[in-house]
Image (tube, rainbow, N blue to C red):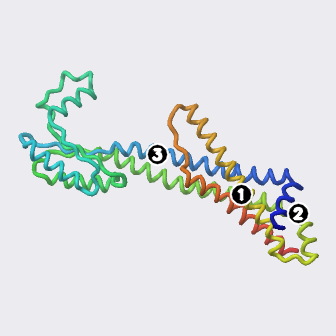
Amino acid sequence: MPAVRDTFSAFRRAPLLSALSITTIAFSLFAVGLFGLVVLNIRQALEKVEERVEIRAFIAEKTPVEQIALAASDVAKYPEVQSAELVTQEQALERARRELGEFKDVFEAEFLPPSIDIHLKPGYRDPTSVHRVADRLKAMSFVDDVRFGEEWIAQLYRLRNIAGVAGVALGLAFAAVAVIIIGATIRMAVLARSREISIMRLVGATDGYVRRPFLIEGFIKGVLGGALALCLTWLAIRLVGGYLSFQTVFFDQTIALIGIACGAMIGLFGSAFSVGRHLRKV
């Protein structure tokens, strides 16, 4: 295929310029990918913290255990609830002594009331959902008190929203800068071959024939740049995780392929825009 042959001929004729284009795409996408990984790991950490969101309904004295167990079974059927566990006075005492070992001699079984401990499903750990479940629990006649760390949950949800908005805004800013840099690099590559384009037009080549090798070249550079950016991002997250000794998460296969596809599309559309602009001047 002539267009493919011309593309690889262009790589051979200007290897340094081709390498510069690929490296620019790679480092631009690397900056976006690195920021994306930071956001992904922050979100992962917040989700881990969200798993600790718990509602504890304390039961009034002398409530039959059977009634508490039946209530726990009903609460477990709420659409927001992941699990509802009955904690007897003896279990509450054992837990208190385990968590506060230095004060284990202070607690007595009669001092700690039984309770129903509720964990919520993902997506229902926001303040509104927690309040909704807590209000239903408070309406039960044998529930003496309901605790769920209201202020802590509100702060956590606010932090998650701030992280999400900041992540999207800064991610778009990084992406815009990357597109501008990549577009300028591709334009330099097209301008370096302006004489070749002019000669092709003089001998009667159509715009489509002129564009084709540049589009293929831009697509290949974008794929190579995206793959290189992915490798750099993986290496960076491994080094950071090893140095700081904490577990980090990397992009899954779908997001990785989307990143490479984005590099390909940037290279393709950048070449199309630059060549089209140059052809209008010739």
Check disc 2 and report the residue beneath it. Answer: 193
Check disc 1 and report the residue beneath it. Answer: 222
**Residue 208: x, y in percent?**
80, 75
Q: Earlier in the sequence, mark 3 or mark 1?
A: 3
**Residue 268: x, y in percent?**
72, 64
Check disc 3 and report the residue beneath it. Answer: 44
Q: Amino acid at mark 1?
A: Gly
Instruction: Say which element carries label 1.
Output: helix
Labels 2 and 1 touching (C-beta < 8 A): no
Determine crowd level at label 1: few under 14, some 14-19, many 20+ residues with C-alpha closer than 10 A.
many
Determine crowd level at label 3: few under 14, some 14-19, many 20+ residues with C-alpha closer than 10 A.
some
Q: Residue at x 49, y 50 (%)?
A: 163
Q: Nearer the viewer, residue 189 or 104?
A: 189
Labels 3 and 2 touching (C-beta < 8 A): no
Instruction: Say which element carries label 3.
Output: helix
Distance CA(mark 3)–CA(mark 1): 29 Å
Q: Earlier in the sequence, mark 2 or mark 1?
A: 2
